[in-house]
Image (cartoon, grey):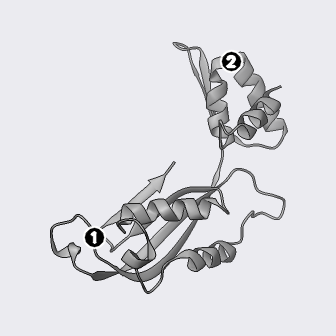
Amino acid sequence: GPIRFLISLREKGVVSSPISGLRNCLRRGPIFCLILRLILEREGWVVRYSVFDLTSLSFLLQLAMYLLKIKEDFSAAHALKDYHGKCESLHGHNYQVLVEIEVEKLPNKGYLYDFREIRDYLKAILPDHKNLNEFFSFNPTAENIAHWLFYKIKEKYPIKACEVWENENSGARYEE
């Protein structure tokens, strides 16, 4: 059935969330998607909307999601490699990190993750008061730091995106 189909796709690593699973099921046709929507609603999923496209005869279902956002800052120094300008010299930033954790369904208690638990984990992995060139093996740009943090956080939480800001005007975002 549709639920086993989604679970099997998730177990095989084809999809990471019901939304991508639903998109993958479009190939099975609109009737399959309509049945899937009814089953998901019966199971307690909140379906925000469905679109029936008469030209392609397909449904696009999107499930409601919760997006947790956690901000944390750290101070660090770095010198950009392969860069010609003042940022090639050692300098510092008061970085701000924004992490987005995606939650598909809440348990009865009303939350899946405690904000403090996520923030404590984030604080533990942030390179606070470090020379980033010594801490990382890669060029410590905001883009590379966001990428690294994304995968560190992904080890423990279902992260959607990670932003790293060097100042209020300049930052980078990594998402999948």
Task: Give the label, 1 or 2, closer to the camera.
Answer: 1
Q: Residues within 10 Å of mark 1 (few under 14, many from 20)?
A: some
How far apart are labels 1 and 2 at the CA level?
A: 49 Å
Q: At 77% across and 34% down in the image, what residue appears?
A: 8
Secondary structure of the residue carrying numbered label 2: helix
Quarter in which the N terminus is drawn: top right
Q: Quadrant of residue 103?
A: bottom right
Earlier along the polypeptide chain: callout 1 or callout 2?
2
Instruction: Tell me the kind of residue under disc 1.
Output: Leu
Q: Which mark is residue 80?
A: 1
What amino acid type should be assigned to the residue bearing mark 2?
Answer: Arg
Residue linked to disc 2:
28
Q: Where is residue 110 shown, x and y percent of the image?
A: 77, 63
Q: Residue at x 72, y 36 (%)?
A: 12
User: Is the residue 10 above or below the residue 78 in the image?
Assistant: above
User: For numbered disc 1, what is the local secondary structure?
Assistant: loop
In the image, 140 versus 110, the foreground residue is: 140
Question: Which disc, if any, is residue 17?
Answer: none
Q: Give the residue at x 22% y 74%.
A: 87
